[in-house]
Image (cartoon, rainbow, N blue to C red):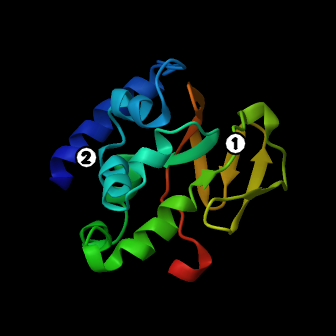
Amino acid sequence: MLRSTIVTATAAAAMFAGGIAYAQDSMNIVETAQDAGDFETLLTAAEAAGLVETLSGDGPFTVFAPTDEAFAALPEGTVDDLLKEENKDRLTAILTYHVAPTAAMSSDLSDGQMIDTVNGEQLEVSIDGDTVMVGEATVTQPDIEASNGVIHVIDTVLMPPEAM
């Protein structure tokens, strides 16, 4: 499954690199992520954690969305382990660390800004020229609008302090 996910991620990354924007403001965050095609692992994890309904709700939300490639870069077996029922709380903590309870476009972010996440922790924004980082992740595609918020694509799965 992960091998086919990597192929899909590579194809989707090529589309992002080509400048295709996914401004789908008539679709919610989950529908927009499904339409983009590079978030199968994230969507599977959100379903396992019971977060799909919430992220399909009113919002507003900002989702720092790791690509399938970002999940594939985790140590072997990590995703499979997190998807187990007994690890649901840990998975939920990790996923909610990627979500802010507000819609923040890239123009709303500033260097050194601390963003409150749904899991109660904060992420620091770092901006250096055109490079925007949230925690240890680089934003590779900002400002994908959805009806209930915004998605910023990131290249790394963020781990909250208590999950490490």
State the image coordinates of residue 2 (x, y, percent, origin top left). 20, 54
Q: Image height check: is 32 above or below 152?
A: above
- Amino acid bearing label 2: Ile
CA distance for labels 2 and 1: 24 Å
Q: Is residue 102 left or right of residue 91?
A: right
Query: In the rendered picture of this protein, how many numbered marks are placed on residues?
Result: 2
Label 2 residue SS: helix
Towards the viewer: 116 or 79? 116
Q: Which residue is mark 1?
A: 131
Return the mark for residue 6: 2
Residue at 32% across, 57% down? 72
State the image coordinates of residue 137 (x, y, percent, origin top left). 58, 55
Label 1 residue SS: strand
Residue 66 visible in the current orientation: no
- Amino acid bearing label 1: Thr
Towards the viewer: 28 or 36? 28
The answer to which of marks 2 and 1 sits earlier in the sequence is: 2
Q: Image height check: is 85 above or below 135?
A: below
Task: Please say if the residues under marks 2 and 1 sit with CB atoms less than 8 Å apart.
Answer: no
Q: Image height check: is 74 above or below 44?
A: below
Towards the viewer: 112 or 41? 41
Residue 50 visible in the current orientation: yes
State the image coordinates of residue 23 (x, y, percent, origin top left). 53, 19
State the image coordinates of residue 100 (x, y, percent, origin top left). 65, 51
